[in-house]
Image (cartoon, rainbow, N blue to C red):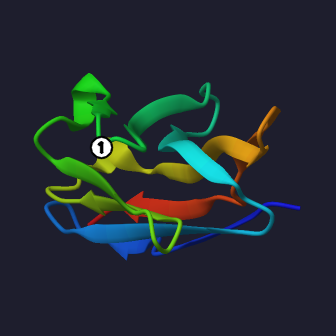
Amino acid sequence: QVQLVESGGGLVQPGGSLRLSCAASGSIFSISVMGWYCQAPGKQRELVAKVTSGGSTNYADSVKGRFTISRDNAKNTAYLQMNSLEPEDTAVYYCNVQGWIRPGRDFNFWGQGTQVTVSS
């Protein structure tokens, strides 16, 4: 019932930038956390960044100072601004949204994933 639509991935050169978007829609009472995870071939899915409804953020050490997560609560949309991209950032990026459909009914949904490729 809750749907996430991701966009913004693509091919960029090292040092370039991308901005990922994740828009949530459906029966949403509130959203507590929105986050971005990445998964490279043969690797586990791991946290890139997350932001709470109050604006508190958390980043993987590998992206600190380069990536910025933000959210527009009115639009139920999260963004990941990715600067100074490196080949090691190449992965499929998944949006994750946690919140409440109604009081007492929580949810945890994943987006379809968007490919980010950093290469010369």
- Residue 19: x and y in percent read 33, 70
What residue do we see at 27% from left, 62% from top?
81
SS of the residue under disc 1: loop
Position of the N terminus by quadrant = bottom right
Q: Please tell me how crowded label 1 is: few (under 14), some (14-19), or many (20+) other residues with Cα within 10 Å.
A: few
Nearest to the observer: residue 102 or residue 58: 102
What residue do we see at 53% from left, 52% from top?
93
Q: Residue pushed farthest right? A: 1
Q: Determine whether, in the image, residue 17 is placed left or right of residue 77.
A: left
Nearest to the observer: residue 88 or residue 28: 28
Type of residue at label 1?
A: Gly
Q: Is 12 located above or below residue 15 in the figure?
A: below
Q: Determine whether, in the image, residue 71 is placed left or right of residue 6.
A: left
Residue 117, quarter of the rendered image: bottom left
Position of the C terminus by quadrant = bottom left
- Residue 7: x and y in percent read 53, 75
Q: How many marks?
A: 1
Q: Determine whether, in the image, residue 62 is placed left or right of residue 77.
A: left
Q: Determine whether, in the image, residue 79 is placed left or right of residue 95.
A: left
What residue do we see at 62% from left, 25% from top?
44
Q: Is 71 located above or below residue 17 in the figure?
A: above
Nearest to the observer: residue 113 or residue 72: 72
- Residue 88: x and y in percent read 33, 41
Q: Is 35 located above or below residue 112 in the figure?
A: above
Q: Is 20 located above or below residue 91 in the figure?
A: below
What residue do we see at 50% from left, 49% from top?
91
Q: Which residue is mark 1?
A: 55
- Residue 17: x and y in percent read 22, 68
